Amino acid sequence: MASNNTEDQPPEQHIGIDVLTSGEEAWKELYTFFLDAGYRLRSRYEPGWKPSWLEVSAKSKYPEDAVKPFTPNITHATHLKTGQYVVIKRIESDEDSTELDVMAFLTAEERAGDPRNHCVRALGILDHPSDPQVQFVILPLLRKFDDPPFETIGEVVDFVGQVLEGIEFLHDNGVAHLDISINNVMLDGTGMYPTGFHPVDQSRNFEYTGPAVRQFTRTEKPPTYIFIDFGISERFDADERRITWNKEGTDHSVPEYQEGYEAPVDPFEVDVYCLGNLVKTDIIQGNPKSSRSGYYGFEFLEPLVDKMTQQVPKDRPSMKEAMELFHSLVEKVEHSHLRSRCRRRPLFKGDRELPPVEVYNTVRHAYKKLVYTYKGLPAIPKRSPPKDKEPAVVQHPKSRLASLFPGRILGSTSKSEPAAPAEPEGSARGEEEEEDGTGTGTGTGVGTEVAK
């Protein structure tokens, strides 16, 4: 007989989320394994978990354990030694898989300290306790590259410069990414969010008790932009012919991927096209098909993206040539333009700021410009040089793949409570995320423990 006590029923907005998916069940079965290795999965995966919102005394409108993950092969955990969130990615090894090899190559000591290296750094790697074909890579928690939104033209120029630099670094080291897209470019927002944020719903704070607080802008605390997902990347020796037949990338507009193209594909030329197309469709023009609107004021970059997206692969520049052209174009841009407000193009008729909102944002930005000028902050943000040039990867002693990643060994498997998040540096104004913001904690998802 059904109970008439409404207090026994879950709140309407949480109905259906008290059941774990099959992917979540797999993580739940490994809860103790990860705990022994020094990583505590979210409470949702604890043995014997009961939804917190079913408790009569529960008062939280946003219970943390009600948040579902976005992808089955990704989960998040707290690193017990530091108290920070990390990402755990499940990778199935096979004879065609190159992801671990490429990540190991890019994490090697001679490359890890290169300031041009914008590749995600593995923090650790664990073998599955019972499946020899599965490994778990521990990665830093990241944010989407455009979250929070860009505020100045100069901030976007810094983004473009960093991603060009990152792919130039890959190519100089014989690596082709082959899947450059908005889904695979993230940012380390540790500086902007010193108190952290939730790994799945990144609009919420670290403890999931309120909105995430952004205490600094990109101009004040310049972020590092990071490439993720090397699942289809390829590495070539210096004397090896650089061709690929791989056509699995996200950007399906690549001319070499079109039906009827039979010539050998140069993977480095594909990277040049994909990166140019990302800047073209997501920064300059926009792409209504994917609800990407682009921004005003970046026409000065059109000569660069036009060359990078040439239909004939051999007509595209190398990444070194693209970098040189980028710098020559940026040098001609007025300082006042770089300081100006970054405004999105409308996606459809009527998709514009209301006059009162536009006035408010214009005045607010004018005030920020005065503050930046007074503080002597450059119009194009400049990152501080990395302090620690050691390999960022940390292995657990149990890992039989430790030889792939020559780094520090994580010896602690303490089950003690995590340390509290670090206190913010300085006392800049805090800006809360919108309550209805959507989280972006996917993939390797910046967070609080990031590559140095």
Image: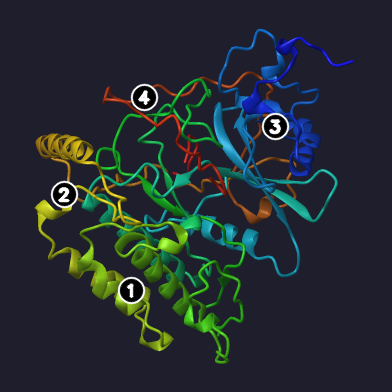
| Vertical comparison of 301 with 208: above or below | below
Whole-number angstrom distance, CA of label 2 to CA of label 4: 28 Å
Indicate the secondary structure of the residue bearing disc 1: helix
Instruction: Please report contact status of discs 2 and 1: CB closer than 8 Å, yes or no.
Output: no
Instruction: Please report contact status of discs 3 and 4: CB closer than 8 Å, yes or no.
Output: no
Count of labels shown? 4
Name the residue at 45% across, 79% down.
269
Residue 381 x %, y %: 24, 48
- Per the image, the residue denoted by label 2 is 340
Numbered disc in front, either 3 or 4: 3
> Residue 255 versus residue 130: which sits nearer the camera?
255
Neighbor class of circle 3 (other Cα within 10 Å; few <14, some 14-19, many 20+) is few
Numbered disc in front, either 2 or 4: 2
Instruction: Please report contact status of discs 2 and 3: CB closer than 8 Å, yes or no.
Output: no
Whole-number angstrom distance, CA of label 1 to CA of label 3: 49 Å
What's under tag 4, amino acid-wise? Pro
- Residue 207 seen in the current view: yes
- Per the image, the residue denoted by label 1 is 320
What's under tag 1, amino acid-wise? Lys
What's under tag 3, amino acid-wise? Ile
Neighbor class of circle 2 (other Cα within 10 Å; few <14, some 14-19, many 20+) is some
Q: Locate the C terminus by quadrant.
A: top left
Whole-number angstrom distance, CA of label 1 to CA of label 4: 38 Å
Numbered disc in front, either 1 or 3: 3
Whole-number angstrom distance, CA of label 3 to CA of label 4: 34 Å
Examine the image and state in which quarter residue 4 appears: top right
Whole-number angstrom distance, CA of label 2 to CA of label 1: 29 Å
Badge 2 or badge 1: first in the primary sequence: 1
